[in-house]
Image: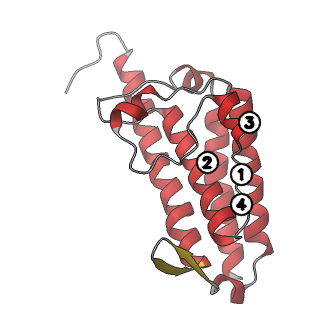
Amino acid sequence: MRGADVMLHALELVHGFYRDMRADPALLAARDFRAAPLANSLAWNWWHTARTEDFMVNRICRDAAELWTPALVAATGLPHGIGTGQPAHEAARLRIADLDAFFAYQEAVFAAGEAFVASLDDPALDHSVRIGDRTETIAENLTLHVLVHLSAHLGETDLTRELYEHDRTPGAPRS
């Protein structure tokens, strides 16, 4: 099996988990819940992971324009950046004004990421890209900044969901 095939399968699995969240009315209702003052909301995680994948795949690996446009910023009410290093008080204010527009963007990012990875052969995975003052291979970039990063935020969203449900369960024990 080619390395790109393994990466594509993993990316499709991660995207599937995010798609499942979009289809869950309880999660949509809980999207702005933050479990603690420094915790991120589900909405923040959805925005941040889509923006990170868009930036890494399109800007860094493909050296192309990102899918995030000023029109999407205006429609969704979300910042232009990707959220890395964003102060907690700014992250706490993040709200998605137009879920349909945001989820259409997220789906476009997923499709672009999957198409890019599917187009790679094993030698292309060794191609070097610049990120800041570092050089990484495409394989390293996609593994760390997309697959691992999105998976870590999946864990965060799952914990947020559990805490949201626990917080709203009458008589639930507090630890």
Q: Which of marks 4 and 3 is in front?
A: 3
In whole angstroms, how far apart are the C-alphas of marks 1 and 4?
6 Å
Position above or below: 49 against 36: below
Q: Nearer the viewer, mark 2 or mark 3?
A: 3
Q: Which amino acid is tagged 2?
A: Ala
Tell me how many marks there are.
4
Position above or below: 6 against 11: below
Q: Nearer the viewer, residue 90 or 164?
A: 90
Q: In which quarter of the image is the N terminus?
A: bottom right
Query: If you read the primary sequence from the N terminus, does the residue marked by circle 2 or circle 3 appear first?
Result: 2
Q: Is residue 149 visible?
A: yes
Q: Residue furthest top?
A: 170
Q: Residue 101 carries which label?
A: none
Query: If you read the primary sequence from the N terminus, does the residue marked by circle 4 or circle 2 appear first?
Result: 2
Q: Which amino acid is tagged 4?
A: Gly
Q: Are marks 1 and 2 in contact (CB under 8 Å)?
A: yes
The image position of residue 71, as x and y in percent, is: 74, 36
In the image, is 85 to the left or to the right of 37?
A: right
The image position of residue 99, as x and y in percent, is: 67, 27
The residue that mark 4 highlights is 113
Q: Which amino acid is tagged 3?
A: Ala
The residue that mark 1 highlights is 109
Q: Residue at x 65, y 38 (%)?
A: 20
Q: Residue at x 55, y 72 (%)?
A: 141
Q: Are marks 2 and 3 in contact (CB under 8 Å)?
A: no
